[in-house]
Image (cartoon, coloured by chain):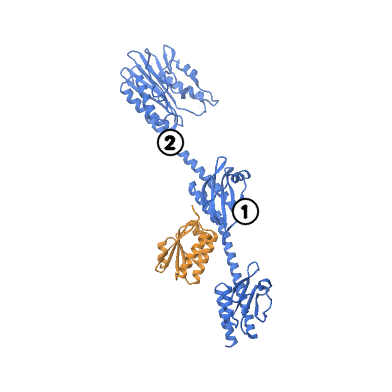
Amino acid sequence: MPLVRRFAEFIHDLQQLERTAARGDAILDAFTRHTPFEGGAVYLRDRDAILRLAAKSLQFVAPEILDCDPPSELTAGADRVLVPLRSGREHLGVLALTGGEYSDEDLEVLRAGAAFVATVIVNQRLSQEAREGDFQLKYRLWELESLYDIGLSITGMLNIDELADEVLFRMISLINARRAALFLRDGGGFKPYRAFGELAVSEADLQRLLETEKPISLDGGTVVAVPINGNNQIIGVLVAADRETREGVGAFEANELRLLSLFANQVGIALENARLHRDALEKQAMEHELELAATIQRDILPKAIPHIERVDIAALSRPARQVGGDYHAFFERENGVAMLVADVSGKSMPAALLVSALHAAVQLLVREGRELGEVATELNRHIHRWSAENKFITFIIASIDCESETLEFVNAGHNPGYVLIGGRLETLKSHGLPIGMLAQSKYMTQTRSFPSGSTVVLYSDGITEAENEAEEEFGDRRLEEILTQSCSAAELRDRIAAAVDAFVGAAPQKDDETLVIARTR
Amino acid sequence: MTEELKVAVERKPQGAVLYTKGYINNVGGEEIANRAYELMDDGVRILLLNLRETKIVNSIGISILIEIIEKMMDTGGKIAFCCLTPVIHKTFQIMGLANYASIYENEETAIKELGL
């Protein structure tokens, strides 16, 4: 075959190497097919310029080639020919060929083929480097985009569980971690909140992070932990383990630790947002509950004062913002009127529900016409059975009989009521435990004379314990001074209210204020 | 949550759909590559990767996916993706995968468009 044609076919084969990676076996195969040599070996330098065996035929053994520098020129020996693979000054490797008669012409073909292969290898390496550079550039862009995206995405997430998942997913892909965990502050330490893969960090290591407020590196750098700052303190810790490479896993590098710290800043803002949102929701729920409780209480309190012949009645009910448990009611009776003031323990919805239970029971019992002691005793049994253990009610009920000019009353642990008879002020003291405290409590009706022109005043402790800004209480004495003034029930109520307001000033109302006044004509 | 990737394959008349579940990292990426190369050796030239149950992919996983795409392109075939999370979709766009592989919102559209 003419040399030119032989060389053209050889180059055509070598060109195939351009399409795929220039692997040692493909190079050796092309050279043994187009030259008289039967076998040999290909040695290529790796990225660290170390000569390594890339391919060889079965019978070829020449380990000494690896120990020497590749020749700079083709060397034709007795048993082998060594052809350098060079591009400019760069030694890329060496081709060793053996077995076969060869001519000078064959050696020229070898030289030209080796030069072509060297160019292919250089081109492929440059192309690979360009691709890797492009990948790295895109990867850095992606890192930046990710940080930006994370900021936008997670700071808008208000559900802490969803946020925790997103945080883990983002950090894992951002720093090529295989495992990750999010710890949240729990008192003086941290508790694991979410993890991707199994990842444990000792209490001592987390404590060290809390004290130094700096990222820590564990297990030879294969585990890193960075603090999450929020609200001027460390509110959590991000932990990542096993930085992935193509070959397996290893230690994290400074760049990844820096990225993770930047990421932790974003997470801190997001966690704070989620916490504030949760607080706002709780506050909203509480306000809704208060509103509901206030509605319940408002609906069961008397809408109007009953008109009773020979009795002048006035009432005042001022609920505090945080709903307390004051209750009052009037009941028309055959020869007069009964009225009660009660104060249930607790606040908000539980108190409102207890007031509601009290309202239902007392309405039934009084309207059945039972005498007051029996009403209180039955009420006690009912409330004790159906309400929570620590719930009780202070309760005072008084009934005026205009015919017999008497006043019956029961005071179960409530503030003493007042009666003003002929300008003399007396008290209706408690003579039993609050309602609901002890199942076996029994209450006896107390009776006293109540001549025409007398006044009875029932009130809750919200009146006498109203506080001014100096935290002083309005007290019994100020109330008693007003009670001795001679005026109508409504006027008396207004004077007490005005006196309490004047005393309290700008201080907030802490408890419900209830006042019931009845004066016989 | 676990880091392990699971791959399922469904052969179609004109190719195959490969379903991934879990983290596409070096281990997961290699698992996908092995299954994809088996399919290519078996003559599959249209391969759809449904990433519906994958929420995370890292840069090693992406580089392996790029290799699979290049290998398929060398054979004259085609690789496409569907059901990507918004985060993975954006990642593919930035990392250049979207230049060489089609991305579809759902599997039904992908199968129709690819003629699977």
Q: What element carries label 1?
A: helix
Residue A220 got which mark? 1
- Subunit bearing disc 1: A
Placement of the C terminus of chain A among the 4 image quadrants? top left
Q: Identify residue for label 2.
A: A289
Identify whether B54 is placed above or below A27. above
Please tell me which residue is depicted at 57% across the width and 40% down the height of the picture: A188
First-in-chain label (1 vs 2) = 1
Q: Which of B8 and A405 is in front in this view?
A: B8
How packed mark 2 is, by other alpha carbons closer than 10 Å (few <14, some 14-19, many 20 or more), is some
- From the image, state the color of chain A: blue
Distance from Cα at disc 1 to Cα at disc 2: 54 Å
Which amino acid does the dot numbered 2 rest on? Glu
Placement of the N terminus of chain A among the 4 image quadrants? bottom right
Quadrant assignment, res A370: top left
Image spot of residue B111 (x, y percent): 41, 65
Which amino acid does the dot numbered 1 rest on? Gly
- From the image, state the color of chain B: orange
- Subunit bearing disc 2: A
